[in-house]
Image (cartoon, grey):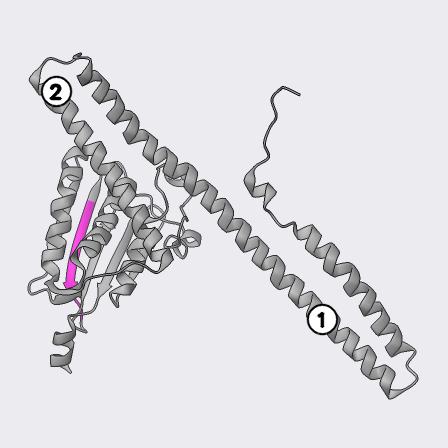
Amino acid sequence: MSGKRSVPPLSKLTRTSPLGVWVLVAIPTLLVLTCGILILIFRQSVFDVVIGLLLVLICIALGAGAAITLLGIHADRRLAELQIEFVSKVSHEFKTPLTSIRMFVETLRLGRVQDPSRIEYCLDVISKETDRLNTLISRLLSWGAMEAGAFHMDLEQKPAKELIELALRAFEPQVIANGAKLDVQLAEQLPMVDVDAAVMVDAILNLLNNALRYGGEDKQIRLDAQRRDDGGVAISVQDRGVGIDQKHQRRVFERFYRVDDSYHGKGGTGLGLAIARHVVIAHGGSIELKSEPGAGSTFTILLPAAAELREEAA
């Protein structure tokens, strides 16, 4: 038989129904509970009391098990929804630069542009979009390695100032392209830290990119680095954007989690902050967020001093 047929969503095909759990658990539990209560009411011996109490306790255990199962189903469903949304957003993130690359390659291939300056512009756009794709792919690969427990770091002693300068150098094209204003305040004599420079620079760069994306129309960003009392370093990135509601602040570092698009109106995969937090924790540090709606946000990476320096201080 020919014709079109709609395919139900995969999430519905694999979803466990909470109603099914209640039917399978609630009805037997009620029957057993009824029996237990009747035995206790019409008890004729100590044995009846013991059996009645056991039946009631069994019902309590079944109820608790059902509640835990339902909580697990809710968590799994929420994760599935976030994963579906994540795949959709990643697809969109891939599609945008790929469309630009294809359009400019086609333009150059057909010889529609003859002016050398315009050709250089087209090549520059292709280069930037390629870098954008590479960043996204690297982020996905990093997260996949973290999930599989196969993410490794090569730690070496580096000046904290050098890490920040590397991140700023990588961020400079974004500042120029978007007309952003970047205020950098670095304290003197920042400590040495034990880090994998590449992944830590990427974590700092992620905070800078987020500040640019969500930093409001004026695009004013401040990067501040100070030596902490314990000898470590605090690297803060502050924006003047719309800020983050308190209800979202505890969850922005979760995988796939993103503040509603209606709130920020921006794209993204919801992995950047999760990866940054994972990397910072792996370095023995922590990452903090301070934000108020309408007053911008400040993300701060806290890193301990290099092990040798801590030993000398001790």
Q: Residues within 10 Å of mark 1 (few under 14, many from 20)?
A: some
| Earlier-in-chain disc, 1 versus 2 | 1
For the residues labelled 1 and 2, the Cα–Cα distance comes to 74 Å
Task: Identify the image quadrant of the C terminus.
Answer: bottom left
- Please report the residue visible at 57 percent of the width from the left and 58 percent of the height from the top: 72
**Does residue 253 appear to the left or right of 195 in the view shown?**
right
**Does residue 235 appear to the left or right of 7 in the view shown?**
left
Q: Residues within 10 Å of mark 2 (few under 14, many from 20)?
A: some
**Residue assigned mark 2:** 119
- Please report the residue visible at 25 percent of the width from the left and 42 percent of the height from the top: 135
Outermost residue on the front side: it is: 1
Q: Would you say residue 223 sits in the magenta stretch?
A: yes
Q: Which residues are magenta?
A: 221-228
Front in this rendered view, residue 235 or 27 = 27
The reply to whether callout 1 and callout 2 are in contact (CB within 8 Å) is no
Q: Which mark is residue 30?
A: none
**Does residue 288 appear to the left or right of 12 in the view shown?**
left
Q: Nearer the viewer, mark 1 or mark 2?
A: 2
Which secondary structure type mostly characterizes the magenta part of the structure? Answer: strand
